[in-house]
Image: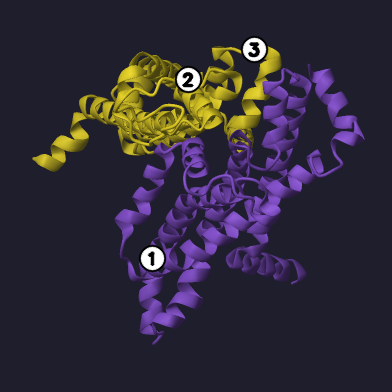
Amino acid sequence: MIGDALAYLLDGSHWSGSEGMLGQLGQQLLLTVTALVLTMALALPVALLLGHLGRGGFLAINISNVGRAVPTFAVLILLSVGPLGTAVLGPYGRAGLATLVALTLFALPPIITNAYVGMREVDRDTVEAARGMGMDGRQLFFSVELPLAMPLILTGLRLALVQVWATATIAALVAGPGLGNVITAGFYRSDYGKGLAGAIVVAAVALVLEALAALAERYADPLATVQRRQRAMIAVA
Amino acid sequence: MTLPAADTAGSCYSLYVNHWFCPSYLRDYQDELTAATKEHAQITIISVLIGLLVAVPLAVAAREIPRLETSILGVSTIVYTIPSLALFPLLVPFTGISKTTVIIGLALYSLTILVRNTLAGLRSVPDEVRESARGMGYGPMRMLVTVEIPLALPVIMAGLRVATVSTVALTTIGSIVAYGGLGNLLAQGVQDSFKAQILAASVLCVLLAFGLDIVLLLVQRVLTPWTWKARVG
């Protein structure tokens, strides 16, 4: 069976064309990135502001507990059979709207929880000191709390990215776009080599995304950048 | 399964009527729904139990050997990154199209959550407590079983609840290899656009998750009475 999968992967014709694996991969990436950007635009401002004000903590913490209990598979199906179903949404393909909404909902919990907790966990003494230096709310938010909360915010984004990619695979179960189609087509038609090949590609891309996000996290974290610069200066000295 | 052709009076599902809320569906398909819920609960519970049985010794070992900890956490990150729709097919060459495939996959996922929490729980035991136990002549094994694990229980149980609730949700994906409990009904429902079945299976999934969560909460209260009696008293 593994041999069949490798043979499938090595055959160039399986990668090309609009139904090929490259096309599906691109479509799934497009879905993942769009959903993540949508969620960030929706959730980050609210969660960061609530964290800054110290309000709505109960909601921010519990949203992830509820989110875990609701199977994404069920949400996808409910949306696609329900009002958002069947329509083709431009480059997002069949059931594109249902998939996009389900993925956006799915990415909310990790992003909200981490952004809120990140803002709240900023050392209170630091906040007091900043206030004592005469910073107003706006300055406090942008130059103290946000940089210090950045590691946790970025971790939330990384978690969301990988989870959304993984979940986008499931879209195939409701006739949606993405690499999941290769897996389901293989398994439903007893072409296990093909199914396995799809699974290998999905898992490999997930690992690559995780690694890239971890790398981006290191470079986007302002504190880590400062520390690197300090270390470099010490090294030069 | 196809929708019944006979359009009985007052029915809310048939070839021509397809409602979301449908009491007569629940009545007519009671046996199928019960069987699917039972399979779902069985797969979830067995997977999480296997995960727990492997996670505790692994966490204890990881605490003793720091290098082991790095590799365990690394591997668990990798496992958690692999989408479930990909993981089950990846296991098929080894375990075939069977319930075992789903259980092993889900046990792997819950293992990754449980190892981290068990390790965190063991780390949360205060050093003073450990010192006193050692001073009273406790050996490592006795200390682990009678002092450390009981004190780590609140954190371990928190992890167990997270693992159980996520496993209930993930079990639905098992339908890719035909063993997904309620997920099978969901997959069937989407193929037939059978709304009553989709809604019923979704709601049962969420109820099962919350039900198991409440059971674990009660177990935790019985096992660690000190954590909540203190707050009441």
Q: What is the residue that sits farthest to the bottom in this orientation?
A: A134
Residue B177 in sight from this viewpoint: yes
Quick one: label 2, few (<14), some, or many (20+) residues within 10 Å? many
Q: Which numbered tag is attached to residue B95?
A: 3
The residue that mark 1 highlights is: A51
Query: Is A24 situated above or below B212?
Result: below
Q: Nearer the viewer, residue B82 or A234?
A: B82
Residue B165 image-quadrant placement? top left
Residue at image position (59%, 52%) is A158
What kind of residue is marked 2? Ser
Q: Which mark is residue B47?
A: 2
- Measured in 3D between alpha carbons, the distance from the residue under mark 2 to the one under mark 1, in whole angstroms, is 37 Å
Chain letter, purple: A
Is the residue at mark 1 from the same chain as the one at mark 3?
Answer: no
Above or below, comparing residue B191 to residue B32 in the picture: below
**Residue B119 in picture, x, y percent from top left:** 46, 33
